[in-house]
Image (tube, coloured by chain):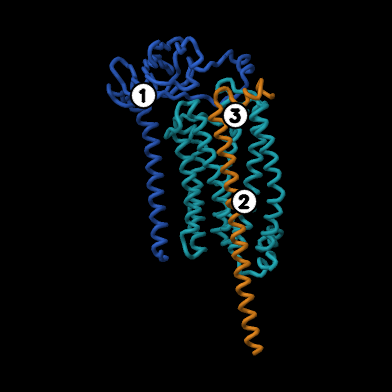
């Protein structure tokens, strides 16, 4: 398997398993966290805008119906 | 409730604190690297520009190459003694602790410690400095004749 | 001369363009990172000095290079935003700061995890490491300044000023290994000479460097689009896009 003789050797990283796997793992986690956070920010701003718009629509309807009366 | 003015105050304060911490870190890093840094020849002849020699008992940082064949290990403990050299005279470094994996004869190292009588440095920290070259082992052997062995696997260093 | 750019200075066009960019660069970045990491972890040869711990390089180096690259683009965007009063560029500075902070954090802790077995220490206060830590503080400062003013434009202006001033740190990081006696070694690939790295190890590294650039572009575009929605939340085009 590539530069290693076996899968176990690959996992062991010649004794540096802790350092290598922890760096790859943490880097992956940080990128994923940044992605999820950006996604969450987008969702919440979308919801906020839609809610504001609904409030505005309701007010508009109230004004309209009052005018009819 | 945070008012506008309070918020701005916090922003300004945190920026100031950040700036102060930053400047502090830079000064600390520079003083560590410049004032306390000696090469083996500077320990014996004094600094090139100023001629300042370190005094016995002074804390310092030393950088140089581990002299080939000078590494002596105490078989009972982690105590290790080796000579360090740059271009001129050698000094002796004594260290009681675990060496980094890159430590070997001919390797550039940086040690933190105290100067003792007879140009001996009692180190409390030994760090390995490596160059910017990366290559596979077979290529390195062909090009440089270097075969690298971890200190913990090197029988000459006296580890089990 | 810049007339062709004018249509994109409209927020609506900029929004659509940035989402299109994001859709193009995100898959490219993900595929590139998968190829680069597998190549680096499995197929690249081990290093003659550092054995398999050198495989940390395939993430440490791209993250470190782009931690500086992101800052330069952020600083230039901030400078243009200040000089020509361009609101879209202010928003792009806000979009880039957290990405740069993430790259810097990755460079710092992968470096730490690499330094422990090789150098013998997690951390030293040498010029390279200290200036990179300052870069992280700068990113945090830029992001915090945006949030700390009630008036959005004042906050944006303050953040842009810090982004511009902080650019001085980038050449300091790059040349720190030459100007001072650092424990960190010199540059392997970002120098004018031939890279001091075997081609079998250089290829996966280059793939990851390009992939992280793609990741930066994709993330920036996505975050830029979000911040644009926030800044323009009362405009008609935003309501039309959200469709309700």
**Chain of the residue displaying label 2:** C
Q: Residue at x 62, y 86 (%)?
A: A66
Against C92, residue B140 (above or below) is above
Front-most of residues A19 and B140: A19
Q: Circle 2: is it few (<14), some (14-19), or many (20+) Cα within 10 Å?
A: many
Whether residue B86 sits left or right of residue C58 in the image: it is: left
Residue C199 in sight: no
Question: What is the drawing colour of chain B?
Answer: blue
Which quadrant of the figure has residue C80?
bottom right
Respond whether the residues carrying marks 3 and 2 are from the same subunit. Answer: yes
Q: Which mark is residue B124?
A: 1
- The secondary structure type at the circle numbered 2 is helix
**Chain of the residue displaying label 3:** C
Q: Which chain is orange?
A: A
Q: Which chain is cyan?
A: C
Measured as percent of width and height from the top left, residue C201 is found at: 64, 27
Measured as percent of width and height from the top left, residue A40 is found at: 59, 55
Q: CA distance from mark 1 to mark 3?
A: 29 Å
Residue B92 in sight: yes
Front-most of residues C190 and B109: B109
Quadrant of the drawing holding the N terminus of chain B: bottom left
Q: Which mark is residue C55?
A: 3
């Amino acid at each position: 398997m590539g530069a290693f003789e076996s899968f176990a050797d690959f996992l062991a990283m010649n004794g540096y398993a802790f350092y290598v796997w922890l760096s790859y793992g943490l880097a992956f986690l940080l990128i994923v966290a940044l992605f999820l956070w950006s996604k969450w920010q987008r969702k919440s701003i979308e919801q906020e805008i839609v809610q504001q718009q609904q409030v505005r629509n309701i007010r508009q309807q109230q004004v309209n119906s009052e005018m009819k009366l | 409730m945070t008012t506008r003015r309070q918020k701005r105050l916090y922003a300004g304060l945190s920026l100031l604190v950040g700036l102060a911490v930053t400047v502090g870190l830079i000064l600390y890093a520079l003083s560590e690297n410049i004032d306390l840094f000696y090469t083996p020849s500077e320990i014996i002849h004094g600094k090139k520009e100023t001629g300042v020699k370190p005094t016995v008992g002074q804390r310092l940082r030393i950088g140089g190459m581990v002299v080939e064949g000078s590494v002596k290990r105490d078989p009972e403990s982690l105590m290790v003694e080796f000579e360090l050299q740059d271009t001129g005279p050698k000094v002796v470094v004594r260290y009681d602790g675990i060496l980094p994996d890159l430590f070997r004869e001919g390797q550039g190292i940086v040690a933190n410690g105290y100067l003792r009588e007879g140009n001996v440095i009692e180190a409390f920290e030994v760090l390995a400095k490596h160059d910017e070259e990366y290559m596979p082992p077979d290529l390195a052997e062909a090009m440089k004749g270097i075969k690298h062995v971890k200190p913990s696997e090197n029988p000459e260093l006296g580890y089990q | 001369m810049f007339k062709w750019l004018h249509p994109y200075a409209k927020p609506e066009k900029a929004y659509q363009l940035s989402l299109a960019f994001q859709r193009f660069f995100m898959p490219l970045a993900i595929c590139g990172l998968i190829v680069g990491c597998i190549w680096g972890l499995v197929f690249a040869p081990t290093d003659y000095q550092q054995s398999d711990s050198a495989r940390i390089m395939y993430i440490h180096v791209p993250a470190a290079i782009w931690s500086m690259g992101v800052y330069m683009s952020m600083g230039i965007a901030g400078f243009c935003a200040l000089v020509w009063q361009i609101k879209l560029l202010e928003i792009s500075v806000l979009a880039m700061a957290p990405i740069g902070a993430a790259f810097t954090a990755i460079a710092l802790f992968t470096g730490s995890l690499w330094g422990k077995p090789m150098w013998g220490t997690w951390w030293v206060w040498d010029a390279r490491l200290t200036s990179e830590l300052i870069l992280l503080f700068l990113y945090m400062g830029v992001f915090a300044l945006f949030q700390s003013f009630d008036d959005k434009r004042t906050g944006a202006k303050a953040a842009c000023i810090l982004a511009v001033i902080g650019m001085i740190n980038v050449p300091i990081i790059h040349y720190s290994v030459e100007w001072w006696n650092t424990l960190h070694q010199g540059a392997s690939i970002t120098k004018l000479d031939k890279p001091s790295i075997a081609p079998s190890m250089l290829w996966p590294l280059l793939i990851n460097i390009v992939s992280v650039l793609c990741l930066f572009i994709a993330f920036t575009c996505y975050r830029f689009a979000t911040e644009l929605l926030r800044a323009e939340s009362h405009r008609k085009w935003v309501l039309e896009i959200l469709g309700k």
